[in-house]
């Protein structure tokens, strides 16, 4: 019953998702503090406004102005149900999508919906500096000059002598404020995870969150991770069942041809194509 209700809600919003979406201007948005200690890469939302930790497998993404975040490398922000990518302002889920493959070459990773960023990689000892559209901050060096002089000790002493790598977080006005580059400051917490854990513990002592119903998904799907905004007590996005397309065997043995019976509609329980393998 609950799953059917979820499908109804998702489908009722699809009409709005088909409309062109324009981001709210950055000056009219309030971004969370820049995160520290991400599990994967740092990311900037496709609106070009807010930085966050790139979302990992089965974590929610998208939402209004991409407030739920953007996915890490090789993952796509997909519809929770269906075969396509999420339509903003809907919420999606980060996962692998065979129909939307990603490349493993840094200079080929242009993402049309992301802002332009510049930086350098080092490939076989040579600096490859590019400007590309990407939401993932995975450049090794920020400029050609720094990259070319990466092994020059005098350059590093000159360039980094006034840079401070001290950083951390403090609880200010009931929220975690994180920063770096200030050598004269002391911090209560070394990173945002520890700060948010302390903030939640302090803030949520007497808060009772609504019970999250345990969901059981069909064998071809998994439950997404619930999402609790940093510093908040209760999850704002619950778990949903979503297709795990990697469980599908969509190929025939060598020498046999594939005859499609029914293409997957991306609904849990019907995630995989139905086909025959004929001589």
Image (cartoon, rainbow, N blue to C red):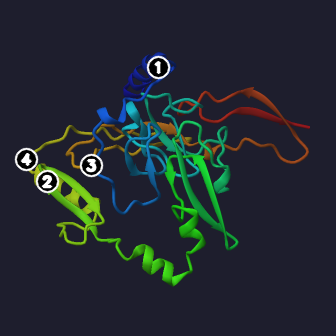
Image location of residue 136, percent across then percent down: 51, 51
Residue with the mark numbered 4: 206
Q: Residues within 10 Å of mark 1 (few under 14, many from 20)?
A: few
Q: In this view, does 270 lie above or below 132?
A: above
Precedes in sequence: disc 3 or disc 4: 4
- What's the CA distance linking mark 4 and mark 2? 20 Å
Image location of residue 9, percent across then percent down: 40, 21
Residue with the mark numbered 3: 230
Precedes in sequence: disc 4 or disc 2: 2
Do the numbered discs 3 and 4 sit on residues whose CB atoms are within 8 Å?
Answer: no
Precedes in sequence: disc 4 or disc 1: 1
Name the quadrant containing residue 269: top right
Residue with the mark numbered 1: 11
Q: Which mark is residue 172?
A: 2
Give the SS element for disc 4. loop
Give the SS element for disc 1. helix
Image location of residue 97, percent across then percent down: 61, 41
Q: Is residue 101 visible?
A: yes
Precedes in sequence: disc 1 or disc 2: 1
In the image, 241 versus 109, the foreground residue is: 109
Do the numbered discs 3 and 2 sit on residues whose CB atoms are within 8 Å?
Answer: no
Q: How crowded is mark 3: few (under 14 residues within 10 Å), some or many (20 or more)?
A: some
- What's the CA distance linking mark 3 and mark 4? 18 Å
Q: Is residue 159 above or below residue 171?
A: below
Q: Residues within 10 Å of mark 4 (few under 14, many from 20)?
A: few
Name the quadrant containing residue 232: top left
Q: Give the foreground label among 1 and 2.
A: 2
Identify the residue shown where x is 21% and y is 66%. 189
Give the SS element for disc 2. strand
């Amino acid at each position: 019953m609950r799953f059917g209700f979820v499908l109804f809600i998702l489908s009722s919003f699809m009409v709005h998702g088909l409309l062109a979406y324009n981001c709210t201007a950055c000056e009219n948005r309030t971004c969370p503090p820049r995160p520290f200690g991400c599990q994967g890469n740092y990311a900037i939302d496709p609106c070009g406004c807010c930085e966050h930790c790139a979302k990992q497998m089965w974590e929610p993404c998208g939402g209004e102005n991409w407030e739920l975040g953007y996915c890490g490398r090789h993952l796509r922000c997909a519809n929770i149900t269906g075969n396509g990518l999420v339509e903003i302002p809907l919420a999606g889920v980060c996962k692998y999508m065979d129909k939307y493959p990603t490349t493993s070459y840094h200079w080929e990773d242009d993402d049309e919906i992301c802002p332009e960023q510049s930086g350098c990689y080092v490939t076989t000892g040579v600096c490859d500096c590019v400007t590309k559209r990407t939401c993932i901050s995975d450049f090794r060096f920020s400029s050609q000059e720094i990259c070319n002089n990466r092994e020059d000790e005098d350059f590093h002493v000159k360039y980094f002598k006034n840079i401070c790598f001290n950083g951390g977080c403090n609880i200010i006005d009931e929220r975690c404020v994180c920063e770096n580059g200030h050598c004269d400051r002391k911090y209560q917490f070394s990173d945002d995870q520890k700060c948010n854990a302390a903030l939640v513990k302090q803030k949520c002592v007497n808060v009772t969150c609504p019970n999250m119903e345990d969901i059981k998904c069909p064998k071809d799907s998994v439950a997404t991770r619930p999402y609790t905004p940093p510093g908040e007590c209760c999850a704002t996005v619950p778990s949903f069942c979503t297709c795990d397309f990697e469980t599908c065997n969509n190929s025939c043995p060598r020498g046999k041809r594939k005859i499609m019976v029914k293409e997957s509609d991306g609904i849990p329980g019907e995630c995989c194509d139905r086909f025959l393998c004929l001589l």
